[in-house]
């Protein structure tokens, strides 16, 4: 099975607007991401929350190193989300170490910095493990260098794209970092589900299957954009409320289209699996079509242990700022949890990242 089977290119929502070209990640400090927490720490409990800034390390590698430093099982080290390796990333980890006196936390900080190339921003105790999704989202400050043409023209192009995105939102595609080099993770995940490949490492097996599920989700969103249904609610959609996260099936099209345009709700995209709430009507037909084209079945996904869920189909970008700098453009923005900065950047740059 080769990766050529899998379509990795995605449509741009602003395809009619020219991009600025350029490059990202020339240096780690040109791609800054800062996690925004879901809740404040209490100062008491058995879980040490460590907020740190790192470069050149994956989230998983950092987790493993913290487990080693504190001599605990890897399962006792939690985090709210994965952050890029080639970036300057600020995020929080939790380590279950038992009750600790606050005055000894200085020694803990020294212990971490002696064994990890990171900056510790703060340490606090809390009552529970930090789990995936325990964050509001992420703030980004990213420099695009090597832009095409004059800076003033590039800035005008970028602002036109930004205006469109602020008006319509973005398809909540998974970014390329989810899929591995040349889509290798997608191919392996597909073959695990098909029974043609075995992965003994349970964590890696879940990651590869999840990568394939993310690929299918992207295919659904691509079909939605290309069919002209990104700005429309469909009969049978499973919609999600932005404020509460509540899910419901769309029946009254006129009423729900108005709420969609007012940015109160969004359609959701399928993360295919046994526990996924399935759409009906035209939306359900579109979901089924993606599986058929992929030569995949819900039964196969279920047998492989893929539970499935729903993913917000339209992500709303906030605090989007653009400015010209000496060597390119600086882009600042906030994205809710689960959304990928590279999806916004590819709209502005008009190139795959």
Image (cartoon, rainbow, N blue to C red):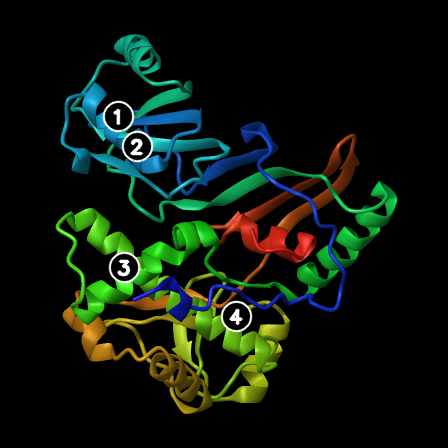
Question: Do the residues bearing badges 2 and 4 touch, measured as CB atoms within 8 Å?
Answer: no
Using the numbered discs, state the Cα–Cα distance from disc 3 to disc 1 in whole angstroms. 27 Å
In which quadrant of the rendered image does the N terminus lie? bottom left
Report crowding for label 4: few under 14, some 14 to 19, many 20 or more residues within 10 A (C-alpha).
many
Can residue 51 be seen here? The reply is yes
Can residue 246 be seen here? The reply is no
Mark 3 or 1, closer to the camera: 3
Q: Position of residue 165 (x, y in %)?
A: 67, 60
Residue at (64% x, 42% y) in the render: 23
Q: Tell me which numbered mark, 2 or 4, is placed earlier along the sequence.
A: 2
Question: Do the residues bearing badges 4 and 1 touch, measured as CB atoms within 8 Å?
Answer: no
Which residue corresponds to mark 1? 65
Using the numbered discs, state the Cα–Cα distance from disc 2 to disc 4 in whole angstroms. 37 Å
Q: Tell me which numbered mark, 3 or 4, is placed earlier along the sequence.
A: 3
Which residue corresponds to mark 3? 188
Front position in the image: 172 or 47? 172
Q: Tell me which numbered mark, 4 or 1, is placed earlier along the sequence.
A: 1
Mark 2 or 4, closer to the camera: 2
Question: Do the residues bearing badges 2 and 3 touch, measured as CB atoms within 8 Å?
Answer: no
Question: Do the residues bearing badges 1 and 2 touch, measured as CB atoms within 8 Å?
Answer: yes
Q: Mark 2 falls on what kind of element? A: helix
Mark 3 or 4, closer to the camera: 3
The extreme bottom residue here reads: 281
Using the numbered discs, state the Cα–Cα distance from disc 2 to disc 3 in whole angstroms. 21 Å
Which residue corresponds to mark 2? 61
Q: Which mark is residue 265?
A: 4
Q: Mark 4 falls on what kind of element? A: strand
Residue at (39% x, 27% y) in the render: 51
Left or right of 228 in this view: 100: left
Quarter residue 254 falls in: bottom right
Relative to 49, residue 131 above or below: below
Using the numbered discs, state the Cα–Cα distance from disc 3 to disc 4 in whole angstroms. 35 Å
């Amino acid at each position: 099975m080769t990766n050529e089977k899998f379509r990795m290119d995605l449509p741009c929502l602003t395809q009619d607007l020219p991009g600025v070209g350029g490059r990202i990640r020339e240096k780690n400090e040109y791609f800054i991401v800062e996690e925004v927490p879901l809740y404040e720490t209490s100062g008491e409990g058995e879980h040490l929350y460590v907020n740190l800034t790192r470069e050149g390390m994956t989230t998983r590698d950092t987790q493993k190193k913290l487990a080693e430093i504190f001599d605990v099982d890897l399962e006792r080290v939690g985090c709210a989300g994965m952050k890029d390796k080639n970036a300057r990333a600020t995020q929080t980890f939790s380590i279950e170490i038992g009750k600790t006196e606050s005055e000894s936390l200085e020694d803990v900080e020294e212990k971490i910095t002696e064994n990890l190339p990171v900056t510790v921003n703060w340490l606090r105790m809390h009552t529970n493990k930090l789990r995936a999704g325990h964050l509001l989202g992420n703030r980004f400050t990213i420099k695009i260098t090597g832009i095409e043409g004059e800076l003033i023209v590039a800035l005008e192009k970028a602002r036109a794209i930004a205006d469109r995105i602020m008006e319509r939102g973005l398809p909540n595609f998974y970014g390329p970092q989810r899929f591995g080099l040349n889509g290798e993770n997608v191919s392996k995940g597909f073959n695990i589900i098909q029974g043609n490949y075995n992965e003994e490492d349970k964590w890696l097996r879940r990651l590869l299957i999840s990568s394939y599920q993310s690929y299918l989700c992207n295919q659904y969103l691509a079909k939605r954009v290309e069919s002209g249904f990104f700005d429309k609610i469909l009969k049978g959609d499973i919609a999600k409320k932005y404020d509460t996260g509540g899910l419901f099936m769309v029946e009254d099209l006129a009423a729900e289209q108005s709420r969609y345009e007012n940015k109160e709700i969004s359609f959701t995209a399928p993360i295919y699996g046994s526990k996924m709430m399935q759409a009906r009507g035209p939306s359900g037909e579109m979901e089924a079509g993606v599986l058929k084209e992929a030569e995949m079945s819900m039964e196969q996904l279920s047998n492989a242990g893929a539970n499935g869920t729903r993913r917000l189909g339209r992500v709303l970008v906030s605090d989007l700022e653009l400015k010209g700098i000496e060597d390119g453009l600086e882009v600042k923005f906030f994205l809710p949890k689960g959304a990928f900065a590279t999806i916004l950047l590819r709209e502005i740059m008009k190139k795959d990242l």
